[in-house]
């Protein structure tokens, strides 16, 4: 059993030593424990510090590519080097690395495909009340979209089984956290949550400018991921809304015309016709998007088989 702990970094020369020092040297049931640093275009000594502290596995980006790309490239490297489990932590020392064995254990025991640390955001001192509310709301939205019940969907402290990584595909550029949960939920992967206590804050987040930027980016990722799996739900809702908006003025026009023979309310008829066209377009788009979803499922099945062939050669 080989476990890779991957650490995405962007100018983390100050905090990386603490992260590396707190990662366990061995885990029960694990034969090999490897550390992988993904340098996302750092301009400081992040890579040099990592190598000085004994890190043998490093993936480097010549420029900043974002967290989602760093996660994807790290997973590709880990799987190509025989990883059975990939743990993702962070270079800012936010997460308690000593809890990595607790994340890995459910995967090793075969009771989970993905394990996500619950940061218990309501207890984090440096989170503002507004941010705590938004964290709960965001998790609720993701759980609704993914048919899951996770208390902290935004947590990046996670463990993934090799088999689950074959089935997950990262397409967003902002963050993989929401997208992988929605994919995992719809693909019926087993997800377990483990409560942890985070470390003290070391710096401001470099992933987003402010909470509103984070909300906008996360919302976009959630909608896109949800549309990948349930496009008909969105377009069916639009079709019903536009259909209702068409029906009401149409009925009004017909009643007035039958009672009074009054053709002066033709504007109601025009509005109803416009809404009817919008409803029909929503139905058509729903059918097309559902057909595309079916095509995507077939392509993902092929991609999963390709990954198995590609990565299993390294074992």
Image (spheres, grey):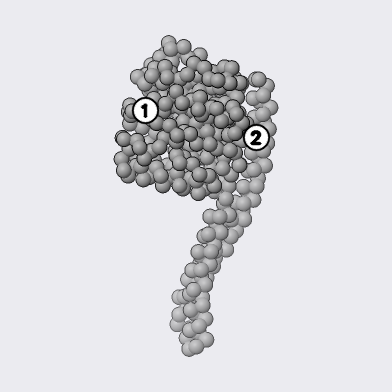
- Relative placement, left or right, of 283 versus 193 is right
| Label total for image | 2
Mark 1 touches mark 2? (CB < 8 Å)? no
Instruction: Tell me which label, 1 or 2, sits earlier in the chain.
Output: 1
- The residue located at (45%, 82%) in the rendering is 264
Query: Mark 2: few, some, or many residues within 10 Å (few <14, many ≥20)?
Result: some
Local secondary structure at mark 2: helix
**Residue 162 occupies quadrant:** top right
Horizontal placement of 254 versus 126: left or right? right
Residue at point 56% right, 42% down?
185
Relative vertical location of residue 136 with respect to residue 53 in this rendering, above or below: below
Q: Nearer the viewer, residue 132 or 248?
A: 132
Q: What label does residue 303 carry, if any?
A: 2
Tell me the quarter of the picture where residue 189 sits: top right
Label disc, if present, on residue 183 of the rendered structure: none
Residue at 65 percent across and 47 percent down: it is 294
Within-10-Å neighbours for mark 1: few <14, some 14–19, many 20+: some
In the orientation shown, which residue stands out farthest toward the bottom? 260
In this view of the protein, can residue 63 be seen by the observer? Answer: no
Residue 53: name its quadrant: top left
- Between 106 and 261, the one nearer to me in the picture: 106
- Disc 1 to disc 2, C-alpha distance: 38 Å
Foreground label between 1 and 2: 1
| Residue 125 image point, x, y percent | 31, 35
Quadrant assignment for the C terminus: top right
Numbered badge on residue 199 = 1
- Nearest the eye: 143 or 296: 143
Is residue 54 something that shows in the picture? yes
Q: Position of residue 286 (x, y in %)?
A: 59, 56
Q: Residue at x 55, y 27 (%)?
A: 105
Q: Report the quarter where the N terminus lies.
A: top right
């Amino acid at each position: 059993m080989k476990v890779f702990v991957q650490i995405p970094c962007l100018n983390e020369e100050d905090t990386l030593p603490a992260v590396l020092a707190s990662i366990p040297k061995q885990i029960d049931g694990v034969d090999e424990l490897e550390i992988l640093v993904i340098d996302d275009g750092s301009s400081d000594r992040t890579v040099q510090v990592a190598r000085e502290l004994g890190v043998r596995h490093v993936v480097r980006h010549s420029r900043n590519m974002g967290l989602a790309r760093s996660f994807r490239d790290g997973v590709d490297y880990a799987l190509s080097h025989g990883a059975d489990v990939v743990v993702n932590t962070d270079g800012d020392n936010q997460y308690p690395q000593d809890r990595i064995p607790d994340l890995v254990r459910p995967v090793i025991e075969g009771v989970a495909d993905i394990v996500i640390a619950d940061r218990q955001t309501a207890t984090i001192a440096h989170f503002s009340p507004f941010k705590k509310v938004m964290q709960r709301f965001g998790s609720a939205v993701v759980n609704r979209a993914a048919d899951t019940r996770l208390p902290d969907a935004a947590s990046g402290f996670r463990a993934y089984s090799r088999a689950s990584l074959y089935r997950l595909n990262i397409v967003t550029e902002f963050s993989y956290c929401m997208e992988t949960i929605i994919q995992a939920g719809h693909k019926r992967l087993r997800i377990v949550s483990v409560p942890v206590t985070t470390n003290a804050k070391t710096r401001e987040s470099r992933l987003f400018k402010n909470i509103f930027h984070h909300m906008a980016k996360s919302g976009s990722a959630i909608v896109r991921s949800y549309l990948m799996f349930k496009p008909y739900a969105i377009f069916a809702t639009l079709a019903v809304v536009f259909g209702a908006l068409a029906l009401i003025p149409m009925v009004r026009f017909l009643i007035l015309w039958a009672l009074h023979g009054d053709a002066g309310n033709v504007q109601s008829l025009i509005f109803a016709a416009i809404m009817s066209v919008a409803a029909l377009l929503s139905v058509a788009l729903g059918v097309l998007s559902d057909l595309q979803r079916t095509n995507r499922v077939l392509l993902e099945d092929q991609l999963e088989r390709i990954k198995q062939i590609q990565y299993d050669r390294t074992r």
